[in-house]
Image (spheres, helix red, strand yellow):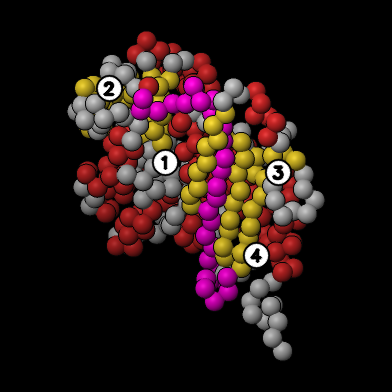
Amino acid sequence: MSTYEAAGVDIEAGERAVALMKDKVARSRRPEVVDDDSGFAGLFDASALLRYRRPLLATSTDGVGTKVMLAQRWGKHDTIGIDLVGMVLDDLVVCGAEPLFMTDYIACGKVVPERIAEIVGGVAEGCRLAGAALVGGETAEHPGAMGADEYDLAGAGTGVVEADRMLGPSRVREGDVVLGLASSGVHSNGYSLVRHVIKNASLDLDTVLPELGRPLAEELLEPTRIYSLDCLELARSVDVHAYAHITGGGVESNLSRSLPGHLGAVLDRSSWTPPAIFEVLAGHGRIEQRDLDRTFNLGVGMAAIVAPEVADESIRLLTDRGLPAWVLGEIVTGAGEAVYG
């Protein structure tokens, strides 16, 4: 007799996972969330947008990439969801949008309720850190397509920004200051190269390297810093012109996306010291500087472009909030590119 369970799909395990994650998801709740007892959709009270004169909805979708493979190897699943939130919701804040809510999607070879609850718990915690609500999601079991211990996750988020408060290239002016906002480590980009280095250099994830002071896996699985609330507070307090989320492509590539065609950014590489993990990867992988620049954030997780007269105030505000920031460069006449001086 053929049954869904015999084919590898355990419906009861999925229901247990939902029960286990319920309390964790509740921690990300916002007052605008409306309950839907059926569970088919997440509801958000749009009347909250009436405080805006011309609200623009912003949306973003992304995944974590191959960082999930290290989480699976190390058996640590409670922070990979934070990485997902960083990838999705911190893209929204670049245009000045306040993240409102998010949904997630997990595909796995086998539903292990405790593991799924850990993953979703991380997503919920990330949403809480970003000030957004996790309003729904889906867990899909794909036996035969994925191994029992394999999973992948993705998500989508929605935010809102007042039309005349939207940030971006059109606001950037010559003489503006570029601020670097510190990353918490590798974040969620470049892990295909990370895994290549680990394999070719025969590195053990359990190894405590002297440069790191903790196992390599712990360093590589350090969750992505969530910038949303810090960036929103900075934009409310001072004259911010643009942000750039430093993800795949590195600092130069992502900052260039926030520049108008007639201006450029000159960056000072000596203005900060990248975290030790990047030196470890470069040394063991014999990675040249250009490839490091094009692959990793190198310690800069977000960049802010601000009016020169508020640069010092901006740094103080961010530092007081526990986010290290510094002058990374300046805006000059150029061709829409950020380069190291």
Q: Hey, what amino acid is under mark 1?
A: Gly
Tell me the quarter of the image containing the N terminus: bottom right
Q: SS at mark 2?
A: strand
Q: Hey, what amino acid is under mark 4?
A: Val
Give the Cα distance between marks 1 and 4. Answer: 29 Å
Residues shaded magenta? 142-170
**Rendered position, 214 above or below 207:** above
What mark, if any, has residue 106 been given in the picture?
none
Residue at 69% across, 78% down: 4
Contact (Cβ within 8 Å) of mark 1 with mark 4: no
Which mark's residue is nearer the viewer, 1 or 3? 3
Q: Choose the circle earlier in sequence order: 1 or 3.
A: 3
Give the Cα distance between marks 1 and 3. Answer: 35 Å
Q: Choose the circle earlier in sequence order: 2 or 1.
A: 1
Give the Cα distance between marks 2 and 3. Answer: 42 Å
Q: Which residue is mark 1?
A: 185
Q: Answer yes or no: is residue 272 visible.
A: no
Q: SS at mark 4?
A: loop
Task: State which quadrant residue 85 falls in.
Answer: top right
Contact (Cβ within 8 Å) of mark 3 with mark 4: no
Q: Choose the circle earlier in sequence order: 4 or 2.
A: 4
Q: SS at mark 1?
A: loop
Q: Is residue 18 magenta?
A: no
Residue at 55% across, 50% down: 155
Q: Which residue is mark 2?
A: 331
Q: Hey, what amino acid is under mark 3?
A: Leu
Q: Choose the circle earlier in sequence order: 2 or 3.
A: 3
Q: Which residue is mark 4?
A: 112
Q: Which residue is mark 3?
A: 43
